Amino acid sequence: MEFTFETEYNTKALAAMAKALRKTIRKKHSRRSHIVGWIVIAFGLLLMVKASAFDFRAVVTSVALLAVLAALLFEDRLNGAIAKKRLLAGTEKAASVFSEGGFVSSTELGRSEWNYEKITVIAETADFFVFIFSASHAQLYDKRTLQGGTADEFRHFIEAVTGKQVQAVR
């Protein structure tokens, strides 16, 4: 059995990848960062309430609080946009072929062969399968371009060859 995907690494796709990383392998770190972020916002609001006048210091505090709030609310989109800027030219599109023995990913820059045991976590969003190799390395596979079977068939296939359960990310 062989499955193929053609994935475009655009900002939306990279935001989905960032979300999958955040909700799986980076879960503890993300939770701690969110707690610290909300504590910073609470202290900043407390400082603003206690301030007697609206001066330059209050403006700086407000801007900082808005920046922290934006980072907390839009972190996946921000991380996706940053990842998009860091992509090497020629890796914006990838074609991947999955078979029993492993999978091959091809871009304009070249071709990479992968073994399934290198995958740490397999995640699934509404539009993508995400293979997570480490806290900073993952690959996406666009379900809309899947050929060779359905998403359910691919999910069963990948679970069988890797011995890992696919984690749903919503």
Image (cartoon, grey):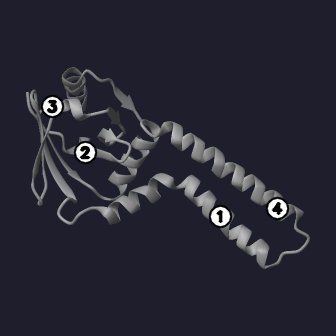
Which corner quadrant holds the C terminus? Answer: top left
Q: Which residue is mark 4?
A: 47
Give the labeled residue for mark 3: 149
What's the residue at 57%, 53% (across, down)?
A: 73
Query: Earlier along the polypeptide chain: callout 1 or callout 4?
Result: 4
Q: Quadrant of residue 63?
A: bottom right
Q: Alpha carbon of mark 3 to alpha carbon of mark 4: how far?
A: 58 Å
Q: Nearer the viewer, mark 2 or mark 1?
A: 1
10 Å crowding of disc 2: few (<14), some (14-19), many (20+): some
- At a point 21% along the width and 20% down the height, the residue shown is 160
Circle 3: residue type: Gly
Gap in angstroms between the C-alphas marked 1 and 4? 14 Å
The numbered dot on residue 10 is none
**Of residues 5 and 106, which is closer to you in this image?**
106
Q: Amino acid at mark 2?
A: Asp
The numbered disc on residue 66 is: 1
User: Relative to residue 165, is residue 31 depicted above or below?
Assistant: below
Identify residue type, mark 4: Leu
Mark 3 falls on what kind of element?
Answer: loop
Is the residue under label 4 in contact with that under label 2 (CB below 8 Å)? Answer: no
Closer to us: mark 3 or mark 1?
1
Residue 96 x %, y %: 14, 44
Spatial CA span between label 2 and label 4 = 46 Å
Residue 142 is marked as 2
* CA distance for labels 2 and 1: 34 Å
Residue 83 % position (x, y) = 36, 59
Q: Amino acid at mark 1?
A: Leu
- How packed mark 1 is, by other alpha carbons closer than 10 Å (few <14, some 14-19, many 20 or more), is few
Give coordinates of residue 141: x percent, y percent. 24, 43
- Is 33 on the left or on the right of 38, as rendered? left
Q: Could you say whether the residue bearing mark 4 is in a helix, strand or loop?
A: helix
Observer-nearest of 122 and 2: 122
